Amino acid sequence: MTEQLIIRLASESTQKNHWLIWSETENEIIASGEVDDALQLNLLTEKAQNRLVICLLPGVDVNIRAVPIKGKYNRHIQQALPYLLEDDLATDVEKLHFNVFSKERDLIHVAYCTQKKMHMWLHWLSEAQLNCLQMIPEGLVLPIAEEGHWSAIELGEQVIVRENKEIAWSCDRCMLSIILESKAQEKLDDDDLIKIDTYSASLSFLFVFMCCR
């Protein structure tokens, strides 16, 4: 298969789901659009025929965290993972879905969301007869900027940011200034400012203003 149907699933059933078809042969997007809500995902069933289906999960629902470990990732660490994070999370870890997507010695990167959200997305896809090959936190598909830079794009009322290869996040636009201020505080001992390459013209000035004040 040389074409992929990529669906950006929404946070709620009443919200729009964006989609596009990517052609590896043409190296470009050959179709795109949106469906009004989860019930209309079945409009994409025919488009999924003979194409790989990949779903992007909204970053406001999926969190990414770096977790230090001792030695290589193994089955014992996999079983203990929820409890390694328990003290840092306000949510009951028994109600979360975890996925390790990057492994290094002494460090792993984990994406997690509530089991309720994951079951909801899987139900939508099942009802629409869409066989999803892979689910990816949306921020991890943004381009990796040059070293020391972040990438960002605006989608509706949300902003999607990728800090590096493993770390990405999303937020409502109204929360952007608060998060950037917090990130800036973390870099107080760093001589470099947060530099962000934006893919939405309306965001460019906002990022420069928030990161340099």
Image (cartoon, grey):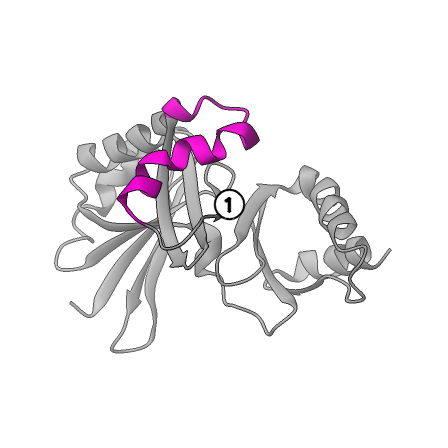
Say if the magenta span includes residue 85.
yes
Image quarter in which the C terminus is found: bottom right
Q: Position of residue 49 (x, y in %)?
A: 13, 55
Q: Camera-side residue: 61 or 95?
A: 95
Magenta span contains residue 108:
no
In this view, the residue farthest toward the front is 71
Q: Which residue is mark 1?
A: 65
Magenta part mainly helix, strand or loop? helix
Q: Nearer the viewer, residue 79 or 199?
A: 79
Say which of 147 and 150 sits in front.
147
Residue sitting at x 77%, y 46%: 181
Q: Is residue 77 visible?
A: yes
Q: Is residue 201 left or right of residue 192?
A: left
Q: Is residue 205 left or right of residue 30?
A: right
Q: Quadrant of residue 14?
A: top left
Residue type indicated by callout 1: Arg
Location of residue 121 (image quadrant) = top left
Residue drawn at x 36%, y 55% is 72
Residue visible at 20% across and 58% down in the picture: 52
Identity of the residue furthest to the right in this view = 213
Residue 5 placed where, x, y %? 27, 56
Q: Residue at x 73, y 61 (%)?
A: 194
Range covered by the magenta-colored residues: 74-95
Q: Position of residue 40 (x, y in %)?
A: 28, 36
Q: Nearer the viewer, residue 37 or 183?
A: 183
Q: Regarding mark 1 in the picture, which secondary structure is present there? A: strand
